[in-house]
Image (spheres, rainbow, N blue to C red):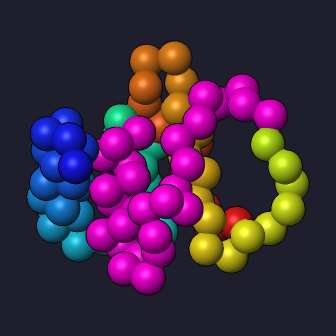
Amino acid sequence: KSLSSANAEINAMNSAGNDGLTWPDKDLVGMTGDEARAAVLAGVSTLSASKIEILPEDAMVTMDFVQDRVRIFVSDDGKVARQPHLG
């Protein structure tokens, strides 16, 4: 685990305590992709980190539903562009 992803995980856990919400109830828009990944993992402990994809907001993706996959779409500045969801 890199230092930046470890810091993102700590930031996500700290921010989860501020409003009492965890993902999927917590709004992740505006977080960095790494912070959002950590928040998703903190919110749903059954998810595997390998099933969380960080992608450019204009990425072409398949439309299939995968119940244990989360796609995090980020803008050019690396911030989450829209709320991630399972599928």
Q: Where's the C terminus, which quadrant?
A: bottom right
Query: Residue 25: horizontal and vertical position, in percent?
Result: 45, 69
Residue 30 visible in rendering? no
In this view, the residue farthest toward the bottom is 46
Assess whether residue 18 is covered by the magenta stretch.
no
Choose between 86 and 19: the one closer to the eye.
86
**Residue at the spot 55% in from the left edge and 62% down from the top edge:** 51
Drawn side of residue 15 relative to residue 53, left or right: left
Q: How many marks?
A: 0
In this view, the residue farthest toward the right is 63
Query: Residue 75: horizontal and vertical position, in percent?
Result: 54, 24
Choose between 64 and 18: the one closer to the eye.
64
**Residue at the spot 59% in from the left edge and 36% down from the top edge:** 55
In this view, the residue farthest toward the top is 76
Drawn side of residue 64 relative to residue 40, left or right: right
Q: Tell me where residue 69 sits by quadrant.
A: bottom right
Query: Residue 14: horizontal and vertical position, in percent?
Result: 13, 58
**Residue at the spot 38% in from the left edge and 49% down from the top edge:** 36
Assess whether residue 56 is covered by the magenta stretch.
yes
**Residue at the spot 72% in from the left edge and 27% down from the top edge:** 58
Residue 4 visible in rendering? yes
Residue 32 sits above or below residue 66 on the image: above
Write the start and end of the magenta stretch as one range. Answer: 33-60
Query: Residue 6: horizontal and vertical position, in percent?
Result: 17, 49
Residue 40 sits above or below residue 20 on the image: above
Choose between 74 and 46: the one closer to the eye.
46
Residue 41 sits above or below residue 6 on the image: below
